[in-house]
Each structure stands twice: as C-alpha cells, then as structure tokens.
Image (cartoon, rainbow, N blue to C red):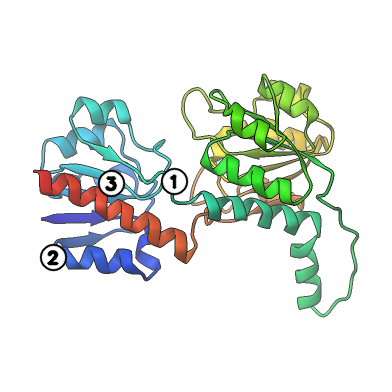
Amino acid sequence: MKILLTSTSFQDTKGKHQEMLQKTGFSVDVLRGPVKADVLLPIISQYDGIICGDDDFNREVLKKASEGKVKILSKYGVGLDKIDLEAAQEYQIPVTNCPGVNHVTVSEHVFALLLCFFKNIHTEYNFTKSGKWKRLTGMELFGKTIGIIGLGKIGKEVALKAKAFGLKIIAFDKFIDKQFCCENNIEIADSVENLCEKSNIISLNVSLNAETEHILSEKIIKNHLKHGTIIVNTARGKLIHLESLIFGLEKNIIAGYLTDVMDEEPMPENHPLLKFENVIITPHVASRTYESVERQGIMAVENLLKHLISH
C-alpha cells in the first residue's frame, strides 16, 4: 500500500499517531500542505490512500484519483471545505474526517486571543522585549456579551469557558440545542443580525459551506454590528467578507479582529489585514497542540485503515 501524507501538524508533532502509521508497514510519501491542485494532479493516482490537510482536492484532482488506485481520502481535522464532496461521491471516493477531537484546544485558543487582545499582552511583550516599560490600560472580559455563531462542539466549549469568565452569552445556530442553552443560561438569537446587534464580542465557530460563506456579510458589518465589536475567528477565513471587514476596521465599527484563519493560506506577505494594529493573526494553529494532534492523527489513521483493509 502506498500512502500520501500532507498534514504538516501530523508530520511535525511526534506522538502515537506517527508510530501507528509507521507500524502499518505502508510506504508513505510526504508533502507539506496545503498542496495545490497542480501539484496533486500528476501524482495522485499512484496512491492507495491519502491523509490530507487543507489541500486542494477539487473535481479535477478527484477524477484523476478515481482513475488510479485511491480508495480513501482521510482528512486530518474536521473542515471539509477544500474537498469537492459532490465530486468525491460521484467518483466513489470515500471521504472521512475527525469530528469531536479538537473542540477543547480550539476553544482555548479563542480565549488565548481574547485575553491577549483585552490585556494588550502582545503589545506589552514587544515593549518589554525592547527594554521599554510602557504600561497600557486593558479591559475586562467580565460582563461583556459574547455572541457565538455556531453552537456545535467547539461553540459549546467556547460557551462553557465564556460562562466561567462571567460573560453573557447569546448564540445562533441553524440547529440550536435548546436544552444546552437552557442549562447554561444562553440566549438564543433568531438570526445572525439579531446576535450582532447585541454582542460586544463575536466568535465564529461554524464550518464553511455555500450557506455560511460570508455569514458576516457586507450588510451585517455595515448595518448590524455594535460599534466597537471584537470578532474572533478560529473557523475559516471566508466566513467574513474581507472588504467589509477592512471597512469595519477603518471606520472603527470593529475594534479588533482576532483570527487563526485567513481567506488565503499561507497568508500572502502583502495581505491587507497586516496594516492594522488591532488585528491579531495566528497561522492556523488553534488545534495544533500535542494532545489534539495526537487525537486527530490517530483517528485519521484509523479511518484510513478501515477503508484500506475493507478493500
């Protein structure tokens, strides 16, 4: 069996997941993702299975895969927005992912970004490292209202941590868990607009698809955000309309944009968000902890084996 591994988190973090893959005895080729379609096209057909990250598995690539040996596309991670699922189904290539393995670590990253921003930690760190003793005034999280868009596993973990910090919580989800909201004193918003009008902080925790792309649209940013809103995005860059985000930052409608994901990854060196001091960007590492990588890696290998053994 010949396997292609593209997930850099899987490759860079030692643990039981790597040992598990090695023990299969499979021949493993490694590429550092995210891998573009033009790189995948000439090679994809030679592999029996792929453990992928956020690589470009478009229709053309999947057609080529179906003409070769590929029996399984095992996504390391949760989001499947880079895989043409309709084409995968058409070409009868099973696609798996790793749900329920990164909600703790991603929710921690939400609050790492928030605390960093509210307490000016990133700025103060740079001051003291350069020998300065400049003391800025921060803000408390306590008593603010956080609006959570997407109350799945990650959204629920964000809500529980928000509750511990003394935040008021409002949530929007197409399939809202009313019992969870009732048990945790979470207000249910009947629309994204309603949530935005009431929130000081907005946390984006939905998957990216045709329905959620630009869920924070131009209309919402210009007409429904409270002045001085802080947005945290640990989901996908394209959940927010970039030009309108820039407008919101320039007009001080958005007081801060804290993100782990970009519309284009890796981020271009001249990205327009880099000019804003009230934007914090981390390079898609919210789920990249030793514990989470191992959990995701093991599940990705297990998913791979299930399909290869059955064939």
Q: Which amino acid does the dot numbered 3 rest on? A: Ser
> Where 187 sits versus 137, above or below?
above
Helix, strand or loop under label 2: loop
Q: Dot 2, how many residues are within 10 Å of its Cα: few (below 14), some (14-19), or many (20+)?
A: few
Q: Dot 3, how many residues are within 10 Å of its Cα: few (below 14), some (14-19), or many (20+)?
A: many
Q: Which residue is mark 2?
A: 25
> Where 279 sits versus 57, above or below?
below
Of the image marks 1 and 2, the number of the one nearer the N terminus: 2
Task: Give the spatial CA distance, label 3 vs label 2.
Answer: 18 Å
Q: Quadrant of residue 194?
A: top right
User: In the displayed structure, does residue 10 sit left or right of residue 136?
Assistant: left
Q: Quadrant of residue 159?
A: top right
Q: Which amino acid does the dot numbered 1 rest on? A: Gly
User: In the displayed structure, does residue 92 sit left or right of residue 196?
Assistant: left
Quadrant of the snapshot with the C terminus: top left
Quadrant of the snapshot with the N terminus: bottom left
Report whether residue 160 is seen.
yes
Of the image marks 3 and 2, the number of the one nearer the N terminus: 2
Q: In terms of depth relative to the viewer, which is nearer, 134 or 137?
A: 137
Q: In terms of depth relative to the viewer, which is nearer, 295 or 215?
A: 295
Q: Could you tell me which residue is drawn at 61 percent across and 55 percent down? A: 108
Please give the label number shown on residue 276: none
Please give the label number shown on residue 74: 3
- Image location (x, y in percent) of residue 150: 58, 33
Please give the label number shown on residue 100: 1
Q: Could you tell me which residue is drawn at 79 percent across and 29 percent down? A: 198
Q: Could you tell me which residue is drawn at 52 percent across and 49 percent down? A: 103
